Structures are given as C-alpha cells and as structure tokens.
Image (tube, grey):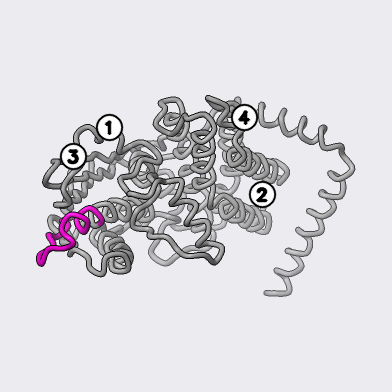
Amino acid sequence: FRLVRGRVGGAEMATTTMASSRLARVPVYMLRKSTGRMLDDYGSRPQTPTTLRQMYELGMRTNYEKILLGAQFLHAELPIRLAHRAKELENLPYDLNKMPSVIKVRQLYENSFQDLVERKRPEDEEEEELFTDLLVRIRSRHDDVHKLMAKGVMELKSESGRGANDLKIHDFLDRFYRSRIGIRTLISHQADMRYSRKGYVGIINPECKPEVIVRDAAQAVHSIAYRTYGDCPEVQLHGKTSLQFPYIEGHIFFCLFELLKNSIRATMETHGNNVHIPPVKVVIADGNEDVTLKISDEGGGIPRSEMENVWNYLFTTAEIPPEKLMEIEEKSRHGGVGCDPIAGFGYGLPLSRIHARYFSGDLNIVSMEGYGTDAYLHLSKLWNKAEDLP
C-alpha cells in the first residue's frame, strides 16, 4: 500500500514539477494577466449555497460515487468562491487592500484559486483522493488568514486612523469571514467523507449533544482561567441536557468557547476576590425551529453605551489593546513569553455570530450593567436553510 501511494505521490510530484517548469518559461506579467482574466470570469459566476440537509444526504451511507460527486461539486464551486473574495480583496475601502497583511491574504486566495483551476476535474477514485488531499492542504494554508486580516486592519488604523468600527470595513469583514467559514466547512465535509469518522456523516454528527459540547468548552476555558486567575467559577447545566440533534459540532464549540471565556473572565474580574464565586449557568432549550443555549453570568454586565460595540471586530474590554495582544502572541509563537489567551483581540463575538448565522441561527446579547450578561445562541433545526453566503 505504501509503495502504491509512493508511486501515486511521485507521479503527482512529477506532473507538478513539469507544470512548474513550463510555467517558469512564461513571463510573470503574462501569468498574472491570465490569472486575472480567470479571476474575472469565475468571480462573475454565481455561488451555489448548500443546505445542511444536502450535506447530510451526500454524506449518508458514503460510497465511492458520493465522494466523487462531492469532489466534483467542489472542483466547480470552490474556484468561484475564492475568485469572489480575491476580486473583492483587490478593491477595498480606504486602501485597506494596500496594507501588507491584506496583500498576503489576497495572494493566498489567488494561489489557492490557481491550484484548483489547474487541477482537472476528478473522474475516478485516485483523482478524487489527490484532489481531496489538495483541498486539505489549501485549508491548512489558510489557517491563519483571520489573524492576517486582523493585522491588516490594524495596519490601516495605524496609517489612517480608520479601524474595524468603520461601517464599510465592518461589512467587508462580515462578508469575508462568512465566505471563509463556508469554504472551510465544505472542504472539511469532503475530507471527513473521504476519511470517515465512526458515527459521523461527513462533518455532521447526527447525534450532536449540546450538553457534551458545553462540558468540553467549559473544560477548555477552565484550564485557561486557572492559569490566569488560579480559580474558576463552576459552569452549571440546566434545561434539556439529554437533547440530541444533527449539527456541526465544531461550529457550536467555537461559539460556546468564546461565550464561556467572556463569561468566566467577567465573573472572575468581578468576584475573584470573594469567598463565593457565582456560577456561570447554561440552559439548553429545544424548540420547534431552534435549539437555543443561554449562557448567563453575574460578571457585572456591559454598559449600555458599549453594547453597540460588542459586535465590532477588534473591540475588547481587555486592558491590553488588540494590537499589543497580537504582538505578544506573535512573540510567543516564536519562543517568547506567552500571552494570556483569556482576553482575546476582539474577534470572538462577531465570529461567533457569523458561525451561528451560517445555517440561519443567530447570537444575541442582553446585559444588565451592575449584574451580568445573558447570551442566547440560536441553532436552526430547519434543514432546508441554505448557507448564509456574501
């Protein structure tokens, strides 16, 4: 098996090398012109939103034909989505597109687009496996794109004073991250169909248990809080804790991790010196249209004057500004002193809301200054709701 894989990998490498050799003889300006024309072409094509039901049905009782069908859909669809974003990244308000970090993001999108359009449509199992491996590499290549984009916005603010609270920039970031979540979801679903996990339908868990995800997210935040404060409030579960429904666990975990992190941090900073630290309460409700999780804390609440800012990218109540937090984090990644991850750089809430809205859910925040905050995470049970694409 390893020898066969080696020959396949060698053949792919040889093909890529030969293609690169041919491309090396083409002037750079001609390559850019050709890529630009293709981006214009694909960027003018409509995107095709999928529903959770379609993803589920494609992944159910997975066989070779279904996996190949999924790969062929992504071969046609992903270049369109990448082209839409690459074209928008060329022309952003206030010259945001000229910031060094945003240029890097655009280059990543253009390179991934070119990798896909140069790969022929998979027609058999071997070609599908090579194509799915390419998708996984593209997903890994884009892992840090959200931080690069945040850095680009900081660069613009440093240069012109305009930041993520500007409506035009905020709307662009919403579109950009909605698209990013969609692309990564489709790639992950295809990869999980190919390399299936027991009990899952692609990326979907048909018996997703919010109670288990709450406990996992709470445990992750607890370890951070104990390192930061030396203590942590209890996370109590109430409501329909036995609930199971089909959903993408990773989306729920992302939201719950961010919401619990905010609640636990607020609670510790308000009551950390007290003998009794009030718990953070999570209530699970099962409705006809939505599964709703309410996260309640007694962390002192948010002033009404700041409520409209909580959805702004790079807005944080941490004492350290986002720019400094990112600088410290960069140093920690290169062997320096690590930073305290309990206080992020202001992306948690807006990205959580985009995850919730991806399949027609939502995230709402209600706060009582002087007492605490309630967050309502709504997850749609209506399978016919399509992706929320920009």
Quarter occupied by residue 387: top left
Give whichever of 335, 17 is nearer the camera.
335
Q: Residue 26: percent from the left, percent from the top?
A: 87, 39
Q: Which residue is mark 3?
A: 366
Choose mark 4 or mark 1, whichever is in front.
1
Marks 4 and 1 close (CB-CB < 8 Å): no
**Quadrant that contains the N terminus:** bottom right
Marked residue nearer the N-terminal end (2 or 1): 2
- In the rendered structure, find residue 308 and report the number of the disc placed on it: 1
Residue beneath the point at 67% across and 49% down:
123
- In the rendered structure, find residue 90 and report the number of the disc placed on it: 4
Q: Residue 168: percent from the left, percent from the top?
A: 45, 25
Q: Residue 253: percent from the left, percent from the top?
A: 34, 55
Marked residue nearer the N-terminal end (4 or 1): 4
Give how far apart the Cα atoms at labels 3 and 4 are.
38 Å
Marked residue nearer the N-terminal end (3 or 1): 1
Quarter occupied by residue 163: top left
- The amino acid beneath tag 2 is Pro
**Vertical side of 260 occupied by 381: above or below:** above
Give whichever of 23, 308 is nearer the camera.
308
Which residue is situated farthest in the right direction here?
25
Region rendered in magenta = 265-281
Choose mark 2 or mark 1, whichever is in front.
1
> Which class describes the residues within 10 Å of circle 2: few (<14), some (14-19), or many (20+)?
some
Give how far apart the Cα atoms at labels 4 and 1 are.
30 Å
Residue beneath the point at 21% across and 46% down:
292
Residue beneath the point at 11% across and 47% down:
371
- The amino acid beneath tag 4 is Glu
**Vertical side of 375 occupied by 163: above or below:** above
Q: Which residue is mark 2?
A: 122
Give how far apart the Cα atoms at labels 3 and 1 are.
11 Å
